[in-house]
Image (cartoon, grey):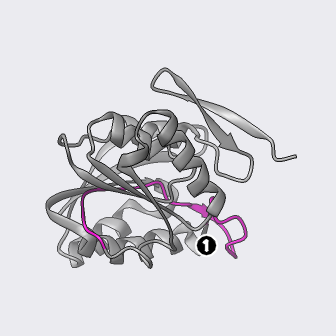
């Protein structure tokens, strides 16, 4: 039996299969701090249950390309977006970051796996050594998928080094600032907003 939990978002309950990352405080924190222009085209990297895709669509996105390497995550996102009435505005793509996505978007959103781990055993959580392996690949790739005057939002923990992220983005010619922070027991989370 493939058990499914529910998560609550925008006054509705949505499916969260147990094989997919369950929306946590970081998911809601990121969603709260995203601003978009109406009819923006968006890309949601590592879509999981689709909470960021739903957030973008509720905020007026005209189309969301939801990307994940987990087939079950794509199925959950599709189902949840259909339930919310956004089925026609959602395109799900199985891809490792931007590997199978050639498109550009006005908004790119990513809640990367950032747990420090020797190996990438749990793909939805583990960020590799220093917890930056996936994030660094994403930082190198996203600028070429961002439309002119586009914005990219992602979350990071202070354990993985904000300064390193800012330096990498500066070298890539991307303007970046931390727009929100929140602390819990052992770490601080920050939402980065990047502009090209």
Look at mark 1 in the image and give the residue it sits on: 128
Res. 179 image quadrant: top left
Tally the numbered discs.
1
Label 1 SS: strand
Q: Is residue 52 left or right of residue 147?
A: right
Please give the name of the residue rendered at 67% of the width and 73% of the height, measured from the top-left corner.
120
Please give the name of the residue rendered at 48% of the width and 36% of the height, measured from the top-left corner.
28
Res. 98 image quadrant: bottom left
Q: Is residue 172 above or below residue 26?
A: below
Please give the name of the residue rendered at 38% of the width and 47% of the height, measured from the top-left corner.
88
The residue stretch that appears in magenta? 103-126
Q: Is residue 113 magenta?
A: yes
Q: Is residue 133 above or below residue 42?
A: below
Please state which of residues 67 and 92 is positioned toward the viewer in this rendering: 92
Please state which of residues 186 and 97 is positioned toward the viewer in this rendering: 97
Residue 78 in percent (x, y) is at: 52, 49
Magenta span: chief secondary structure: loop
Mark yes or no: residue 183 visible: no
Within-10-Å neighbours for mark 1: few <14, some 14–19, many 20+:
many
Mark yes or no: residue 71 visible: yes
């Amino acid at each position: 039996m493939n058990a499914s939990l529910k998560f609550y978002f925008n006054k509705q309950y949505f499916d969260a299969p147990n094989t997919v990352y369950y929306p946590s405080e970081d998911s809601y924190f990121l969603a709260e701090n995203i601003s978009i222009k109406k009819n923006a085209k968006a890309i949601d990297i590592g879509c999981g249950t689709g909470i960021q895709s739903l957030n973008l669509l509720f905020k007026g996105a005209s189309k969301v390309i939801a990307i994940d390497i987990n087939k079950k995550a794509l199925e959950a996102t599709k189902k949840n977006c259909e339930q919310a009435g956004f089925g026609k505005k959602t395109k799900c793509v199985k891809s490792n970051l931007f590997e199978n996505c050639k498109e550009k978007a006005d908004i790119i959103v990513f809640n990367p796996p950032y747990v420090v781990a020797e190996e990438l055993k749990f793909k939805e959580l583990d960020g590799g050594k220093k917890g930056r392996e996936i994030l660094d690949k994403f930082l190198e790739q996203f600028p070429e998928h961002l439309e002119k005057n586009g914005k990219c939002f992602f979350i990071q923990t202070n354990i993985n080094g904000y300064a390193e992220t800012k330096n990498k983005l500066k070298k890539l010619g991307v303007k970046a600032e931390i727009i929100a922070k929140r602390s819990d027991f052992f770490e601080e989370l920050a939402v980065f907003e990047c502009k090209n």
